[in-house]
Image: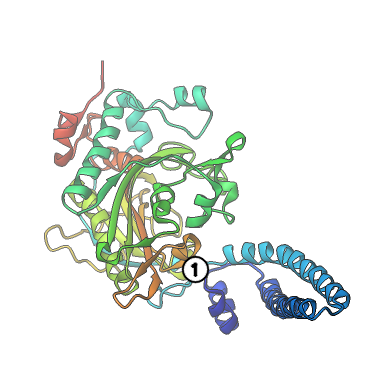
């Protein structure tokens, strides 16, 4: 949530920001409601002062045996006016708050201006995109042939949009979760959390899912609880209404969770396979930092997520999102995208197999241009963001400076990384001509094998 004082003082900057963010929100009612609210508060303060003054006079007149009836009538009249003003405030304030909760965060000055994903900036690419010597298959084809993906059984249990993993597939999913948690706790200094999957509406509101994205959430009506779309929701709200010890900043948490999303806006896109499911697994990184450390922390958090892909030897690239593609609550975001050789290329997009305008920065594994092909695309596997004080203001999370001044913390999070999409990327990037899949070396101790083969 943005500071209402900043909004009052910068109405044109707010409108321009919303244009850059491609928001269609009409903020004119917000300014009208804010003016009326401040007028009512001023009038309320005046009436309360007059009521208190009259009440004091009643005491003095009583002491002098005077007639207090006129003063009593005046006090009663004031009480009626005050009650009327309070009722008007109770009507206005929820409307004002709802509008404030629907306004996008301010992009950081370093975020490129752009209208859509086509204006995102590729920062770097890591790893070789090696052409296969045989026709590439999708992870769905590979997984079903290996007998590790069973979407027919999942549909029987839950309907479309769910996956069921079997045998080596279930073991690979578990190995990926353990590998990522071990990496982030042992090498990157994160504290592991295991948090509830069901949360309150207030918790969803704190991180920005409500009220803006109600249609994307699964709600348990009877208990007024929501299934989390990401562990960010549970973990970030851990410090709601707290003053965090400044000496303990930055606070760094990693959390595995199942995630639940309706995908209401996907309109049938990516309905096959593991890319877009109603339920999926993810390892999430969350940080609480001082404001002056926010951008540096984002670079470090992104590097931690990158390390997962680097160790797995999956080709990936880092993309800075432009204003038009930035998430609702984000001030700045880097997307990590992995190469998927078995997926159909996006027409007119960056996933057509070409690598253009990238900054190649890996000295140990320099990227190579992939060949022209009908298959192959870049697929997002992690979004790493700083939210500045946007979430902290909604959740009232502060820290105290050495001089005693209290300030809002900055919150960050990023997937470290999405398990299902990593599963799919492994199948596609390490598929072999005989139908088997070579397991990345770092996963072999967890899985107890160096490849997935067709089970007889």
Residue 82 at least partly seen: yes
How many other residues sit within 10 Å of disc 1, few (<14), some (14-19) or many (≥20)?
A: many
* Quadrant holding the C terminus: top left
The one nearer the camera, 284 or 166, is 284
Res. 55 image quadrant: bottom right
- Residue placed under numbered mark 1 in the picture: 105
Res. 383 image quadrant: bottom left
- In the shown orientation, is residue 118 left or right of residue 298? right
Q: Looking at the image, which residue sits at the far top? A: 456
- In the shown orientation, is residue 254 left or right of residue 398? left
Residue 117 at least partly seen: no
Residue drawn at point x = 46 percent, y = 26 percent: 154
Residue 93 image point, x, y percent: 67, 65
Q: Secondary structure at mark 1?
A: loop
The one nearer the camera, 184 or 325, is 184
Residue 142 image point, x, y percent: 32, 32
Vertical comparison of 4 with 221: above or below = below
Res. 422 image quadrant: top left
Residue 290 image point, x, y percent: 32, 69
The one nearer the camera, 452 or 297, is 297
- In the shown orientation, is residue 155 left or right of residue 72? left
The one nearer the camera, 194 or 363, is 194
Vertical comparison of 326 with 401: above or below = above
Figure label count: 1
């Amino acid at each position: 949530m943005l500071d209402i004082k900043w909004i009052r003082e910068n109405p044109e900057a707010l409108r321009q920001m919303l244009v850059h963010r491609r928001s269609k929100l009409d903020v004119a009612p917000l300014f009208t409601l804010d003016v009326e609210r401040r007028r009512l508060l001023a009038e309320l303060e005046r009436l309360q002062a007059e009521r208190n003054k009259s009440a004091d006079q009643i005491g003095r007149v009583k002491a002098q045996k005077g007639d207090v009836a006129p003063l009593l009538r005046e006090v009663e009249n004031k009480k009626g006016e005050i009650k009327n003003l309070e009722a008007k405030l109770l009507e206005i304030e929820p409307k004002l708050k709802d509008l404030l909760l629907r306004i996008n965060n301010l992009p950081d000055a370093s975020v490129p201006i752009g209208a859509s994903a086509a204006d995102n900036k590729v920062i770097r690419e890591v790893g070789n995109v090696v052409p296969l010597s045989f026709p590439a298959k999708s992870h769905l084809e590979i997984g079903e042939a290996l007998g590790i993906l069973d979407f027919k059984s999942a549909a029987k249990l839950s309907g479309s949009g769910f996956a069921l993993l079997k045998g080596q597939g279930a073991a690979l999913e578990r190995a990926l979760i353990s590998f990522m948690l071990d990496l982030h706790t042992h090498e990157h200094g994160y504290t592991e959390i295991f948090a509830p999957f069901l949360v309150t509406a207030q918790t969803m509101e704190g991180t920005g899912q409500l009220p803006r994205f109600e249609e994307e959430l699964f709600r348990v009506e009877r208990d007024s609880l929501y299934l989390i779309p990401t562990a960010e929701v549970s973990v970030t709200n851990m410090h709601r209404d707290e003053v965090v010890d400044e000496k303990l900043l930055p606070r760094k948490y990693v959390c595995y969770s199942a995630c639940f999303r309706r995908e209401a806006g996907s309109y049938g896109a990516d309905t096959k396979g593991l890319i877009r499911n109603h339920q999926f697994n993810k390892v999430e990184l969350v940080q609480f930092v001082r404001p002056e450390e926010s951008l540096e922390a984002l670079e470090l958090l992104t590097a931690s997520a990158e390390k997962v892909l680097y160790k797995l030897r999956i080709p990936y690239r880092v993309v800075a999102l432009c204003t038009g593609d930035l998430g609702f609550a984000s001030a700045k975001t880097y997307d990590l995208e992995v190469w998927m050789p078995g997926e159909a290329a996006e027409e007119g997009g960056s996933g057509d197999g070409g690598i253009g305008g990238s900054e190649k920065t890996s000295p140990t594994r320099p990227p190579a241009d992939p060949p022209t092909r009908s298959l192959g695309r870049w697929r997002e596997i992690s979004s790493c963001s700083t939210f500045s004080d946007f979430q902290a203001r909604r959740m009232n999370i502060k820290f105290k400076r050495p001089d005693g001044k209290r300030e809002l913390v900055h919150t960050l999070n990023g997937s470290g990384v999405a398990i299902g999409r990593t599963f799919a990327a492994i199948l596609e990037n390490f598929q072999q001509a005989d139908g088997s899949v070579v397991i990345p070396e770092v996963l072999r101790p967890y899985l107890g094998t160096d490849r997935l083969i067709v089970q007889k």
